[in-house]
Amino acid sequence: DTWRYAFEEAMDEVQGIFAQKFKEEVEANSDHTIQLFPFGTLGESADIMEQAQSGILQFVDQSPGFTGALIPEAQVFFVPYLLPQDEEQLATFFQESKAINEMFPPLYEEQGLELLTMFPEGEVMMTTKEPVTSPEDLDEVKFRVMTNPLLVESYQAFGATPTPLPWGEVYGGLQTGIIQGQENPAFFIESTKMYEVTDYITRAGHNNFTTAVMANLDFYEGLSEEEQTMIQDAIDVAFDHIIEYQDGLTEESLEKIKEAKPSITITTLSEEERQPFMETADDVEQEFLEIGGDQAEAILEQMKADLEAAASGSDS
Ligand code: 6CS
């Protein structure tokens, strides 16, 4: 059969590299072919999610930044400073987390989706038109966020005026000044030329971008056990590939940005400067417990335990 797989990024961006590896593995190990649909070919993230839920697509990559509106527990990824920046620790966490591998799948199933994997896409950085070294600098800044209620809360706590928008409206919004800031990993800031419409990149270390790959549940359950195993194996190969692919990517991307726009200012906030941003975490976490669905508390607790295990695992 031909299976359709849509994602939220271009072919040569992280989700696209993952999808291409998955396609290569599936096609090498079965008679099936995969047709890839990058961003812009089938609509916005919310559109491809609907298509996957209804079975028009067999596979979809959608980030919790958008899924949080559908599965409230997926908002947990927007509690600031919850995820570590250490890439090795992060990879171990995603691979071994009980919260991700055991607790999230039933929640996705309720939405007609088989959760295949979640993986990190890199440190999230703010890009703005004016310098940011404290929450006061975000006062009155209309800051674009993905359409996720907890992400809105977290930028409110950071002092900004959060503006949820689909991705397709961000470049134009910054160009016309409807919004004055946005956040994303360095590779994406580079490839989508966010540096053309903002002048400051700020590393507050508050998050790492998480994404998720899913299959339509009826489709997946209709497969033989061998085919399901083949898919899981292809996902595992693509996971390892995407972790390796991202080694050094953040710094390389920042170098490319500096080359393309020498006047850009890239600032890594000091521990002291990060303090007021970090102090918002407790309130945002509290808000998550209120709006994060029935499993919010259990997921948060399990994630913390998984993160601790990943931290001690990669220390030893
Ligand atoms: O900010 C966004 O909406 C997009 N950012 C990334 C890194 N991937 C897809 C998503 O749509």
Image (cartoon, grey):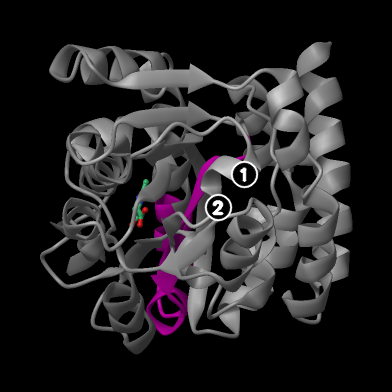
Residues at discs 2 and 1 in contact (Cβ within 8 Å): yes
Q: Is residue 293 above or below residue 275?
A: below
Q: Residue at x 18, y 73 (%)?
A: 43
Place residue 107 in its image quadrant: bottom right
Name the spot of residue 200 as percent of width and height, x first. Answer: 37, 30
Residue reaching furthest left? 41
Under tag 2, what secondary structure?
A: loop
Q: Is 236 situated left or right of 27 in this image? A: right
Would residue 217 be counted in the magenta stretch? yes
The residue positioned 18% from the left and 47% from the top of the image is 10
On the question of residue 39 being in view, the answer is yes
In this rendered view, identify the residue nearer to me: 127 or 235. Answer: 127
Give the residue number, with chain letter if any, for mark 2: 139
User: Which corner quadrant holds the C terminus?
Assistant: top right
Camera sees residue 224: no
Question: Relative to 272, is 186 above or below?
Answer: below
Is ligand 1 closer than 8 angstroms to the Cβ of mark 1? no
The quadrant in which the N terminus is found is bottom left
Is 311 situated left or right of 27 in this image? right
Q: Which residues are magenta?
A: 206-231
Residue plotted at (28% across, 38% down)? 198
Q: Foreground: 261 or 250?
A: 261
Which amino acid, mark 2? Asp
Q: CA distance from mark 2 to mark 1?
A: 5 Å
Which residue shows up at 81% across the image and 13% down it? 315
Where residue 112 sits in the image (x, y, percent)? 49, 84
* Mark 1 lies on residue: 136
For badge 1, the amino acid type reads: Glu
Q: Compare residues 186 and 239 and report the one nearer the observer.
A: 186
Where is residue 152, by image quadrant? Answer: bottom right
Please tell me in which quadrant of the rendered image residue 133 appears: top right
